[in-house]
Image (tube, rainbow, N blue to C red):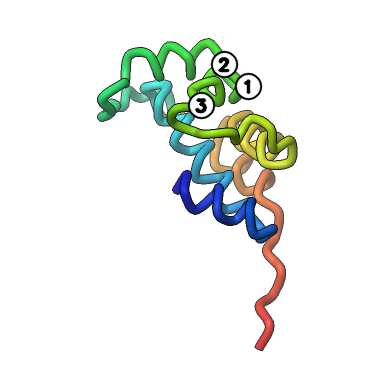
């Protein structure tokens, strides 16, 4: 998803859905779901990423500092704002409210 997000940024394409995916990954790294149930995080760097995810909470900054993973994503203020909005969702209804409606596709 990260390469797709970088490509969409480079091409000026919409990327809200990709930002949502990145936020979901960042939320997953915390090690529990929205209901507080534990998740077994499967990642080679799980310990350091979990620490950064927990430290950041709703702020993606600590995870965006891993530029060897996320590249220069931290400089894209709009995408970072989208990620932050998705990370702040506390349950399914919050997530639904955080995702703007998509524009209809051209026929």
Q: Earlier in the sequence, mark 1 or mark 3?
A: 1
Q: Which percent across, then down, holds residue 12?
A: 69, 58
* Label 3 sits on residue: 67
Using a 10 Å C-alpha cutoff, classify the residue at mark 2 as few (fewer than 14 neighbours), some (14 to 19) or many (20 or more): some
| Discs 2/3, front | 3
**What whole-number distance in Å separates the C-alpha atoms at marks 1 and 2?**
5 Å
Q: How many marks?
A: 3
Where residue 62 sits, quadrant-wise, is: top right
Q: Secondary structure at mark 3?
A: helix
Where residue 59 sits, quadrant-wise, is: top right
Q: Earlier in the sequence, mark 2 or mark 3?
A: 2
* Label 1 sits on residue: 59
Q: Secondary structure at mark 2?
A: helix
Residue 107 vertical placement versus 14 (above, below): below
Q: Name the residue: 29% across, 26% down.
A: 41
* Label 2 sits on residue: 56
Q: Name the residue: 47% across, 44% down.
A: 2
Q: Tell me the quarter of the image containing the C terminus.
A: bottom right
Q: Nearer the viewer, residue 76 or 30?
A: 76
Extreme residue in the bottom direction: 107
Q: Is residue 28 left or right of residue 6?
A: left
Q: Secondary structure at mark 1?
A: loop
Q: Is residue 31 left or right of residue 100?
A: left
Q: Which percent across, then down, holds residue 54?
A: 48, 14
Q: Which percent across, then down, holds residue 23?
A: 53, 36
Disc sitting over residue 28 in the figure: none
């Amino acid at each position: 998803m990260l390469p797709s997000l970088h490509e969409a940024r480079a091409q000026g394409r919409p990327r809200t859905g990709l930002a949502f995916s990145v936020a979901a990954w960042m939320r997953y790294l915390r090690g529990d779901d929205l209901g507080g149930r534990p998740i077994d995080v499967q990642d080679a760097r799980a310990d350091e990423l979990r620490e950064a995810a927990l430290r950041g909470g709703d702020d993606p900054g600590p995870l965006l500092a891993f530029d060897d993973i996320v590249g220069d994503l931290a400089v894209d203020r709009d995408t970072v704002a989208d990620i932050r909005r998705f990370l702040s969702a506390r349950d399914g209804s919050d997530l639904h409210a955080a995702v703007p409606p998509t524009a209809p596709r051209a026929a």
